[in-house]
Amino acid sequence: MLYNSTQNANEVVSAAQAIAQGISKDGGLFVPQEFPKYDINTFKALLNTDYKGRAKKVFSDFLTDFTEEEINDCVEKAYTSEKFGGENPAPISYCNLDGTNLNILELWHGPTCAFKDMALQILPHLLTKSLKKTYDGKVAVILVATSGDTGKAALEGFKNVDNTKIIVFYPVDGVSPMQKHQMNTQEGKNVTVCAIKGNFDDAQTGVKKIFTTQSVAQKLEENNMLFSSANSINWGRLLPQIVYYISAYCDMVNDGKIKLGDKINVVVPTGNFGNILASYYASIMGLPINKFICASNSNNVLTDFINTGVYDKNRSFYTTISPSMDILVSSNLERLLYKLSGNSDTTTKEWMTALKTDGKYEVSDDVKSVIKEKFYGGFCDDVDTKATISELFAKDNYLCDTHTAVAVNVYKQYVKNTGDTTPSVIASTASPYKFSKAVLEAVAPDCKLPSTEFDMVDKLHEVTNAEVPAPLANLKNKKARFFDVTESDAMEKYVLGALNIE
Ligand SMILES: *Cc1c(COP(=O)(O)O)cnc(C)c1O
């Protein structure tokens, strides 16, 4: 199977190249030229295997330049019960809210308690094997600028992975104390964490600049290293997300919730559009999905897009209690537009160029009507997010995080507006303990807030009795290893120093 750039049909690469390179030279994103097709018999076979077996099947159909042995090795190393707290890394909790069934797909049982682990636990293994095929023998240097969650998930994924080094920059006052502690205590012999004096954009700009500075690339080359990226637009991060939709469907059949062949809806709390796009790709492969319900917070650029066909990022930016969805440019939407425009690189490029220059584009009537037919967009503000957490806990004794609550709320709106009772899978993207403050305020509005986030975790546990994930429970006793703070214009020097190649 080969991969194309969404913005240049002449750019054709192997899976290994797509993963090693991350983004196409023309600025487009890599997409598979065609999708494997799964019929009833394929799904029947998948019913009888576990998550790892399903992952191996999906990976082998997309990564045709990988051997079976390589794929098995990646999957076995990534989805261990040690790392994901059980045999099934993505279990479903069956809940009920006022008679509406909620099939909550918990994607946060990994080492950092957020759904990015589902992809970032396997990406390093896919990447090292891809590099071996394309740039044999080189050490990959991963640079990450983070506003919190991605940095920690990438550190956990890359820690002690042979032939990789990872350096993470975060804004010194721009992450929560819990996130800072999560990163500063990171274990591993190939990891470096550094705060920068500036905001997230400064960190991001600094990383991009280092990536494209010729003299730095030269120094790396001389030392048998090269830069690589763990960005959310890397195909190696999207592909693993297809697996859990297929696996969830199989689990629901095995649990007697649906019959093989029945349609489901998916409900996804959306930021960069990666997670929901993975479900769309699964449907192209044959997974019977009726509607894609795209849930946003007050940054509702996608809701408006789905309803009008106009994508317009010229609007106020809100800082919300579901921060991983505080995004105005959803990068992975480009892949959907490419598909819906009939794999047209010129059309996709036109829209993406308009987005860059005017912050805005309008898709064609054909694309609008397909989006209207398959997608439903809705949003929910912070007040309703908290009310949803509180309601679900009070009525069904289920504690969810702020992002998941946005999805539950939008799903309720959907059912009310459409009357559609198709069984629906709700993607749950973080442990409630990752956002203890907001969740505590939701379920115990009268309680006096403890002063540190660790105490909030304890308090939330006291109030709800919900289990605290081990990685967060253990964090309190961990000692910090990283204390560096650097000026944002000194990041290049810092990187060379950390790599010992000044
Ligand atoms: C990253 C993230 C999201 C958004 O996912 P996308 O794939 O970017 O749409 C939602 N919730 C949580 C907790 C996240 O970390």
Image: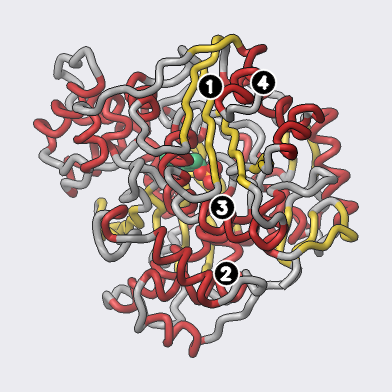
Marks 4/2: CA distance?
43 Å
* Mark in the foreground, 1 or 3: 3
472 left or right of 458 in image? right
Q: Nearer the viewer, residue 440 or 42?
A: 42
Marks 4/1: CA distance?
31 Å
Badge 3 is on which residue?
A: 237
Q: Are marks 4 and 1 in contact (CB under 8 Å)?
A: no
Earlier in the chain: of badge 2 and badge 1, it is 2
* Mark in the foreground, 4 or 1: 4
* SS state under label 1: loop
Q: Nearer the viewer, residue 179 or 261?
A: 179
Name the kind of residue labelled 1 in the image: Tyr
Badge 1 is on which residue?
A: 318
Quick check: can you spot residue 285? no
What x and y, as percent, mark residue 53? 41, 75
Marks 2/3: CA distance?
18 Å
Name the kind of residue labelled 3 in the image: Arg
Earlier in the chain: of badge 4 and badge 3, it is 3
Badge 4 is on which residue?
A: 492
Name the kind of residue labelled 4 in the image: Glu
Q: Are marks 4 and 2 in contact (CB under 8 Å)?
A: no
**Residue located 57% across and 20% down the image:** 200
